[in-house]
Image: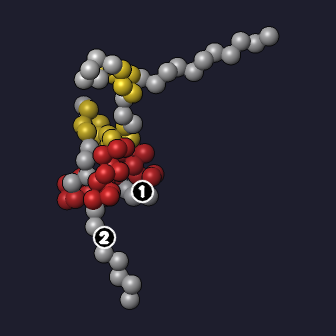
Amino acid sequence: MESKEKSPEPSLAAGPSGGRQPLPELLSTEDMCVIFGVSKTTLMRWRTEKGLPHIRLGHKTYYLESTVSEWLKSQKSVVDLS
């Protein structure tokens, strides 16, 4: 009979009380482009002009899923219904 291996547990980081907390979801620039259907240039403009929260690790840019979600909720849009 075949033995099934368990999939690895998600990465954990030490929390403020010493307990282990799951690491937050990091999205790459490519992930964000696909999710929002925009170009890398548009994401860069959103970062500089609209304050899209991001994290730089070395030469790469990442986005925390939770902070992007909050940023989206805070954005006001104007819809022209005419």
Residue at 29%, 23% (x, y): give it.
15
Label 2 Cα crowd, 10 Å radius (few <14 / some 14-19 / many 20+): few
Q: How is the image coloured?
A: secondary structure
What secondary structure is found at the residue carrying circle 2?
loop
Residue at 32%, 58% (x, y): give it.
73
Amino acid type shown at disc 2: Ser
* Mark sitting on residue 77: 2
Please state which of residues 26 and 42 is positioned toward the viewer in this rendering: 26
Asked if 4 appears above or below 49 in the picture, the reply is above
Q: Within the image, what quadrant is residue 39 found in?
A: bottom left
Residue at 39%, 49% (x, y): give it.
32
Is residue 45 in view from this perspective?
no
* Mark sitting on residue 36: 1
Is residue 40 in view from this perspective?
yes
Asked if 74 appears above or below 26 in the picture, the reply is below
Label 1 Cα crowd, 10 Å radius (few <14 / some 14-19 / many 20+): few
Please state which of residues 14 and 33 is positioned toward the viewer in this rendering: 14
Please state which of residues 35 and 16 is positioned toward the viewer in this rendering: 16
Amino acid type shown at disc 1: Phe
Tell me where residue 30 appears, x and y as whole percent.
41, 45
Residue at 36%, 34% (x, y): give it.
24
